[in-house]
Image (spheres, helix red, strand yellow):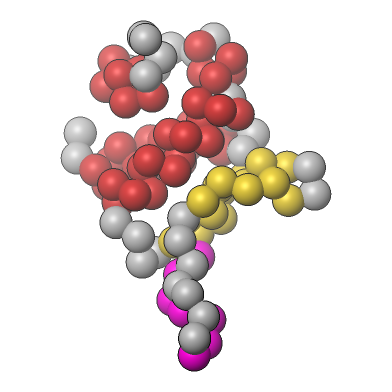
Amino acid sequence: MNEVELLQELIALADAAGLTVRPIRGGAGGEGEPSATSAVCRVRGETWIVLSGTDSAAARIAVVVLALREHARDWLESRYLAPALRDRLGLDD
C-alpha cells in the first residue's frame, strides 16, 4: 500500500470513527503569517483532523494516526483492520 492509499484508508477510518476530517489548502494567510500545517484540534467539543494540502503525505498520515490513536483507539480495537493498518496504527503494541 503506497502513502496515498494509506492516507485514504486512514481518512476513511477517521470518518467512520466519528472524527471530522477537514482538508485545507494550507498556504500562508498573508504576509508575515505562517502557512497552515496539519493538526488535530477540538472545535466546539468535536475532534477535528485538519489536513493541509501543502504537507507531505507522510506528515498528513502521522496526524491522522495520532488522532485515531488518541481519540478512537477503543473504536479501532473493536474492528477488523488489515494488518498493514493495524501495524501503522500501533495497535499490536
Residue at x-position 69% and y-position 46%: 42
Q: Quadrant of the C terminus?
A: top left
Residue 3 is drawn in which quadrant? Answer: top left
Q: Does residue 40 appear to the left or right of 12 in the view shown? A: right
Q: Is residue 83 above or below residue 37?
A: above
Q: Nearer the viewer, residue 8 or 44?
A: 44
Query: Residue at the front extreme?
Result: 32
Which region is colored magenta?
24-31
Query: Residue at the bottom extreme?
Result: 31
Task: Please state the total of marks drawn on the protein image.
Answer: 0
Q: Nearer the viewer, residue 38 or 5?
A: 38
Residue at x-position 38% and y-position 49%: 60
Looking at the picture, how far across and down is residue 4, in whole percent? 27, 47
Secondary structure predominantly adopted by residues drawn in magenta: loop
Residue 34 seen in this snapshot: yes
| Residue 30 forms part of the magenta stretch | yes
Q: Is residue 48 above or below residue 56?
A: above
Residue 25 seen in this snapshot: no
| Residue 36 forms part of the magenta stretch | no
Q: Does residue 75 appear to the left or right of 81 in the view shown? A: right
Q: Nearer the viewer, residue 47 or 18?
A: 47
